[in-house]
Amino acid sequence: MKLKLVVASMSVLGLVSCPVFAATTTTYKHHHHKHHHQVAHQDYKDMGALPYKDQPACMISQNSMIMTDMSQNDGRSLPNPCNPGWFNRIAMSGGVNVDIGKFGNRNQNFMGENYQRVSLNDAYLNLSADVNEWAKAFASLSYSNPTISTAQATSTGNAVNSEYSAAYTNNIGSDDHSDVQLEQAYATLGNMDESPFFVQVGKYYQDFGRYEIHPITRSLTQSMSETLATALGVGFLTNGFSGQVYAFDNPINKVGQNSTTTNYGAALGYNKISDSLGWDIGAGYLNNLTGANDVAFIVNQRNETATASNAGYNTRTGGGAVYADVNSGPFSIGARYTQALQRFNATDLPQNTGSTTGAKPWAVGIQAGYGFDAFSRNNNLYVGYQESHQSAKLNLPQYRWLAGYGVDVLGKNTNVGIEWDHDSAYSTGNGGTGNTYNLVSLRSTVKFG
């Protein structure tokens, strides 16, 4: 995703409005073509609100409108003199996550781990817009340079590369690099005060499992479920209950087909928000598990050749994910589970090295946290355990123990953290090295907005 898409995101956000256009009736006619610029119908993607009763009509000059045509920007959301108060509908936030140290084993080639000594794991700027009562928009511009694979596999079908996150860079073909990305850009159409139903359209993370984007180390379940795609979704949200169905183009095609395949999924959940006793529970279904970006990244490498960098998958394999969380006061605990619902084609994902049986992987994780105040600072301790099954060829460890600590420094929204991951690889007979690895990571975080 390149910088040129940033312009498109500004259109989605509807940064500028001209509510007073509806009150004017002046018509300008161009002689060089038959297109009429009627101010009452000028489309700046943000119309619909009428002016205040005593507010004078706003006019855009004929020269400005002609210049808009000359620059091929007719129909775009553009700055103009008829947008008083636009800043009241725009919100901005952002942050920087710097991984400032990686110590221990830095060559185990596990998906979801960042092995860079110093990296910007995520520097992001979020923009949201209240377009009107029935439409909202969100866009996230981000830069990240953790471990990224740029080497394509050959037709060996065994040795494949890993990276921190294929979802962020859309790096399915192992041919991307650190760049400014339009990570998310979507519109939400609906009014929860009037109806529980909504429509989402654009690029966003699909409701398949639960996870934190850009953590220090991505969990095993996150590597199997994180799905970032340009999609269309229809859902509902009422009294804590939520659900959604969505569809998107799969990130890799079926082998031998040039056209994209349509993937789809569904989710259902319940959330009770409370500081004294809060909890949530939910489940999701994904028709093709190669819709999860890391899974697509691995499967595509296995089917690549030296001359074909986007080979695809051979057989569709569905996936399911469930999650649950409980919090009470300073304590919290959460559980995650993701599984393939059928066996993969052995060419796409073998169970073991050289196996003719396809894998049916699953991953599970549980993590507990404790938050407390000390020295007028917010502190957080957490410990966790993760396990996977038949996932050696997804470049995941079989077991992981982890522990971490974070503390606010220099006041609110500035934090430093440390995390220790103890990974046990699969045995050599099950496609791994049989070794154990330790990785210690330090992170500095600054947020604003």
Image (spheres, rainbow, N blue to C red):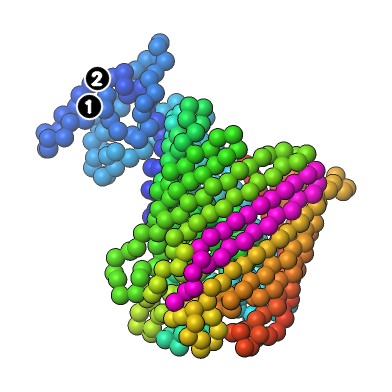
State whether residue 123 appears in this view.
Answer: no
- The answer to whether residue 342 is above or below residue 373 is below
- The answer to whether residue 90 is above or below residue 308 is above
Quickly name the residue at label 1.
38
- The answer to whether residue 10 is above or below residue 44 is below
Q: Secondary structure at mark 1?
A: strand
Give left or right: position of 214 versus 4: right
- Residue 160 is situated, as x and y percent measured from the top left of the image, at 51, 81
Q: Amino acid at mark 1?
A: Gln
Q: Amino acid at mark 2?
A: Thr
Quickly name the residue at label 2.
25
- Residue 78 is situated, as x and y percent measured from the top left of the image, at 36, 37
Q: Quadrant of residue 118 in the image?
A: bottom right
State whether residue 308 appears in this view.
Answer: yes
Tell me the residue at 69%/45% (across/down). Answer: 279
Q: Which residues are magenta?
A: 319-345
- Dominant SS of magenta comes to strand
Q: Quadrant of residue 152 in the image?
A: bottom left
Count residues near mark 2 (Cα–Cα under 10 Å), then give few for <14, some for 14-19, many for 20+.
few
